[in-house]
Image (cartoon, rainbow, N blue to C red):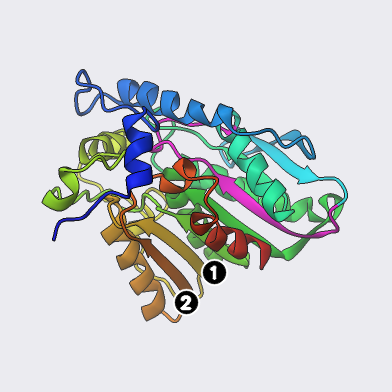
Amino acid sequence: MPFDLDPAVAHLIALGAGPAQPEDFREGDHRRLRAILDDGLAQMRSLPGNPEVLSRSFTAPAPDGHPVRMTWYSIGDVPPGSAVVHFHGGARVAGSVDLYGPLISTYVAWTGVPMLSVDYRLAPEGGAESAALDGMTAVAWLHENAERLGVARDRIAVMGDSAGGGVAASVAIAARDAGIRLARQILIYPMLDDRVPPPDPHLAASPTLFSYAYSRTAWQAVLSSLELGSEPTHLAAAGRNTRFADLAPAFIEVGEMDIFRDENVGYAQRLWAAGVSTELHVHPGMPHAYDVLLLGDDAYQSGKVRAIRSL
């Protein structure tokens, strides 16, 4: 039996939801991919507002001096406690804190947990490891400023979707290596591995919202700063990690019809093999970014909301 795209998602895609799949896209053209993905992400501006959620902007210098821009989203009367460092999607070549603002505001309104949204450097302008280094800068900054923001240092998680999920996974590895203990890594259909597999015929024939050609183009841009023949590290692609012991507990979810499905399941298995508690959800009939398309459906939000609230 072939995979069947969920009817509600299929209807939304037919209406134009999500990034386009234009005929003029040519594999390897990261600028065109950036425009396509930013246009799709801009659809989040239509989300209902959350006036109770306030935002403040901060900057912190990365190790190379680059100013990392961050936005802190919070509800004023929520008591001190946990917090999430969030990384936006966009295939590492697109997306921004500003485009993701409506979604982050929604998460904060749902959970009451404040979030620090990180404007990490995009590829190819930033180096292969810049996103993870910017992410670690944000984690370290939040640790240093935890008291004045009302955050318990042992209740900080990292989170991201798609490319942001991959960045979050790399940051979780870097935090472990730096002796910073995270409460959780919340990885939503994360983009983890630069070794893009041959197209699965069951998925390639369906509207997955993020194609193999998009993935190859994105990774080419991310790794373009590496010397010819050099292997990416786990800071460039979390899927390259070989040491999983002592990583933060993980929550991973992905759609059955997402091209990242197998690498996400494999990553969960490697975490389990290292003794890392990991909760994995694979949603039948769902493509990439299904949760944003179905933002009003509690069935596809309850897992991540619970993961955030339980920090």
Q: Position of residue 211 (x, y in %)?
A: 25, 39
157 left or right, relative to 155: left
Q: Residue at x 27, y 40 (%)?
A: 215
What residue span does the magenta drawing correspond to? 78-97
Q: Residue at x 62, y 34 (%)?
A: 102
186 left or right, relative to 13: right
Above-or-below relation of 303 to 19? below
Q: Nearer the viewer, residue 92 or 67?
A: 92
Q: Nearer the viewer, residue 25 or 225?
A: 25
Q: Residue at x 43, y 60 (%)?
A: 253
Q: Position of residue 157 (x, y in %)?
A: 62, 59
What quarter of the picture does the C terminus occupy? bottom right
Q: Nearer the viewer, residue 94 or 60?
A: 94
Above-or-below relation of 145 to 49? below
Mark 1 vs 2: CB contact within 8 A: yes
> Three-letter amino acid code at disc 1?
Ala
At mark 2, the secondary structure is: loop
> Three-letter amino acid code at disc 2?
Val
Q: Which residue is mark 2?
A: 276
**Residue 177 visible within the image:** yes
301 left or right, relative to 233: right
Residue 89 is one of the magenta-drawn residues: yes
The quadrant where residue 283 appears: bottom left
64 left or right, relative to 280: right
Task: Identify the mark at residue 248; answer none if there is no mark.
Answer: 1
Q: Position of residue 145 (x, y in %)?
A: 79, 50
At mark 1, the secondary structure is: loop
Q: Pointer 1: residues within 10 angstroms few (<14), some, or many (20+)? A: many
